Amino acid sequence: MAKTCTLVLLGALVVLSLLVSPIACSSKLAKATGHHKPAAVRGQKNQTSTNPSLSAAYGGGWLPAGATYYGNPNGAGSDGGACGYQTAVGHRPFSSMIAAGSSPLFMAGMGCGACYDVKCTSNSACSGKPVTVVITDLSPGNLYPGEPCHFDMSGTALGAMAKPGMANKLRAGGVIRMQYKRVPCKYPGVNIAFRVDQGSNPFYFKTLIEFVGDDGDLKAVDLKEAGSRAWTPMAQDWGALWRLNNGRRLRAPFCLKLTSESGRVLVVNNVIPVNWKAGATYRSLVNYL
């Protein structure tokens, strides 16, 4: 009888060990997975964030990237562009100092208008002195090997990183290893402009927002109609264009409330007049300082 009890007890222990062991193992795995976190991004060189514009916060260190150029060697890159700025890229205040950013910089259009200081020392033609570029387009293709992000610049912007008289040599250098960091956009004497899309009508309003100072990019836009106290959120359409389509006639004039990436709010009162026209540009009297 004692022998039988001993066998039963041993059998029970074996079953219990089989039940407990998988649970303990999966618990350890879950704990290890739960503690896996992306690398810190502020000032990191080997960052894993999908939003380098935040990792390169103002005052942060230089981060690595690659650079090429597109378009005319002394031009503005493209008159089109995935941000919607069109020919404005070749004129003040952009002045052809623009870049098409790879997806982590472009951020599906939410990175449009952000400003970066860029410099290079990897080529003998590099001056090592920083110049400022604005994201106005999406860089086609994938990253080159070893790049966390890529700037496909206008020929003018890439050449501006060169020593005097060596812009052509730098542009002929292929993929340039460079450094970048986020900086505030500064447009002295230029206020925010609203270019109404050609497809807009009394029931559907869409506008390009350009020349935004400070952060340069926006994370939210709200519209207030005439006679209303309520702000209605607009949706990002594509690039730097925002739209409102709530299924009824909209009452102008419109006030617009802009919220920058860092959360700064700017209200532009009655910037879109009663008799607004599709295709027209309306310049405000304000900008972020």
Image: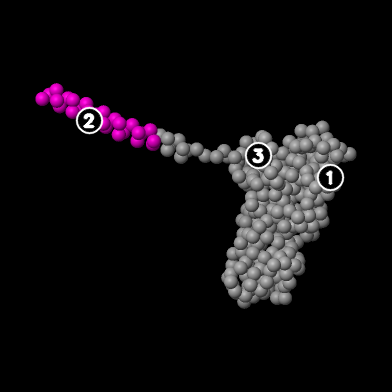
224 versus 139 height, above or below: below
Mark 2 — residue?
Answer: 12
Q: Quadrant of residue 235?
A: bottom right
Q: Where residue 178 appears, x then y in whole percent? A: 73, 38
37 versus 8 height, above or below: below
Residue type of the residue flagged with mark 1: Pro
Q: Where residue 58 appears, x then y in whole percent? A: 67, 46
Mark 3 Cα shell of 10 Å, populated few (<14), some (14-19), many (≥20) = many
Q: Is residue 26 magenta?
A: yes
Give the residue at x 68% y 69%. 200
Q: Using the numbered discs, state the Cα–Cα distance from disc 3 to disc 1 in whole angstroms.
A: 25 Å
Mark 1 — residue?
Answer: 73
Residue type of the residue flagged with mark 3: Pro
Q: Where residue 232 appears, x then y in whole percent? A: 59, 67
- Earlier-in-chain disc, 3 versus 1: 1
Residue 132 visible in this rendered orientation of the protein: no
Q: Of helix, strand and loop, which one carries label 3?
A: loop
Q: Using the numbered discs, state the Cα–Cα distance from disc 2 to disc 3 in whole angstroms.
A: 56 Å
- Earlier-in-chain disc, 2 versus 1: 2
Mark 3 — residue?
Answer: 148
Q: How is the image coloured?
A: one colour
Magenta segment, which residues? Answer: 1-27
